[in-house]
Image: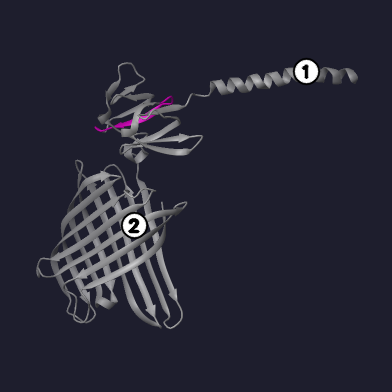
Amino acid sequence: MLLDKLLQIRSLPWLLALLVTTFAQAESSAPPPDEILLKNGSRILGEVTSARSGVVTIETDFAGTIKVALEQIHTVNTQSPVVLLMTDDSVREDSTLVIAEEQVVLSEPGQSFPLDNLAIINPDPWELGEGYRWTGSIGVALVRQRGNTDTDEMDYRLETKWRSKRDRYTLQANGESDEADGTKTADNWRVSGKYDYFLEDPNYVGVLAQAEKDKFQDLDLRYLIGPYFGRQFYDEPIFALQGELGFSYVTEEFNLAEDDDYGASNWSLSATSDYLGGNSSLYFNQMGIWNLKDTSDVIVNSTFGLSYPLLWSIEAAIEVLLEYDSGAVDDVDSLDQSYRFRVGYTW
């Protein structure tokens, strides 16, 4: 018994030495980190996970996710294989790379090309032509006031998109329901669906279907459908601008006024910017309908807003809505202005 204990004690240092050696070998066999060398001489070590729109993303142990503008980078050196999507839509896979002096050098001998030919590092599956990317947001603004005036207000908004390399589906819905002292003061909604088919960048064609109702504008139902031509004028984080111009057939049904139908020219503008930083976004959206039968009749709905993240995937937004209808019925203002603060969930 005593002999067994002595043998165990004598073998303990050998066991500890074996564990230390095994741990050291595991550490030495771990792949070295990717490296980004900045023009100011700083080094960032981690794993380069992506690069797009002139921004390189690297995951680090000391600071989490870091995003660096490509213009601030002197060299990039990856140790793990990456997937490269080129500007001509060709794909390079299973290769490490070095970016230096405006050149991209792959691990295969003789494989190099100008940096301008590189579009994305580690693209998403949909960017390689595999399926769709689903994004969207849903938000609500609520106001409840009790006192001299009892007020209840609710605004809601939904926008979701399915995007592939060749086409895009968009669904939008928004509405407002307000009540003061038990009396309705606003009751309206709008739903639209769009389909876009991409031509040669940056152009696309599509079709729009939309329906809306506004009780206090005497509008029982307005619906339209028609094709359009679109163009992505700019597509950078600092400023993105998209415009569409088309023609549609419009039918209007009123509660009191005479119903109408007509051909129309319709347009839309959409602009965003991350100029303020902090993952915030300035945005502007506008939708217009010009009655070609009565050219003095124009409908323009515009939204100016600022959204910013709160926690997880929850965001807040401050918005100004301007809704103009030059053909509004009697006793109804042509311009309707709304100011709102909303909270929503994005994905």
Residue 30 as seen in the image, left or right of residue 341: right
Q: Residues within 10 Å of mark 1 (few under 14, many from 20)?
A: few
User: Disc 1 residue type?
Assistant: Ser
Q: Quadrant of residue 211?
A: bottom left
Tell which tag, 1 or 2, sits nearer the viewer: 2
Q: Name the residue located 19 percent from the left edge and 75 percent from the top edge.
A: 328
121 to the left or right of 64:
left
The three-letter amino acid code for the residue at tag 2 is Leu
The residue pinned by badge 2 equals 306
Q: Is residue 268 above or below residue 24?
A: below
Which label is found at residue 240? none
Q: Position of residue 281 (x, y in %)?
A: 34, 52
Q: Residue 311 location, x and y as percent? A: 47, 53
Based on the picture, tell me whether residue 82 belongs to the magenta stretch: yes
SS assignment at label 2:
strand
Q: Position of residue 27 (x, y in %)?
A: 57, 23
Residue in the picture at 17% in, 64% down: 289
Q: Which residue is mark 1?
A: 11
Residue 187: image quadrant is bottom left
Q: Tell me the magenta residue range.
A: 78-88
Mark 1 or 2, nearer chain start: 1
**Relative to 16, 41 lies left or right:** left
User: Can you name the residue that lies furthest to the front here?
Assistant: 40
Q: Is residue 87 magenta?
A: yes
Determine crowd level at label 2: few under 14, some 14-19, many 20+ residues with C-alpha closer than 10 A: some
Residue 231 lies, in percent from the top left, at 19, 48
Q: Nearer the viewer, residue 14 or 83?
A: 14
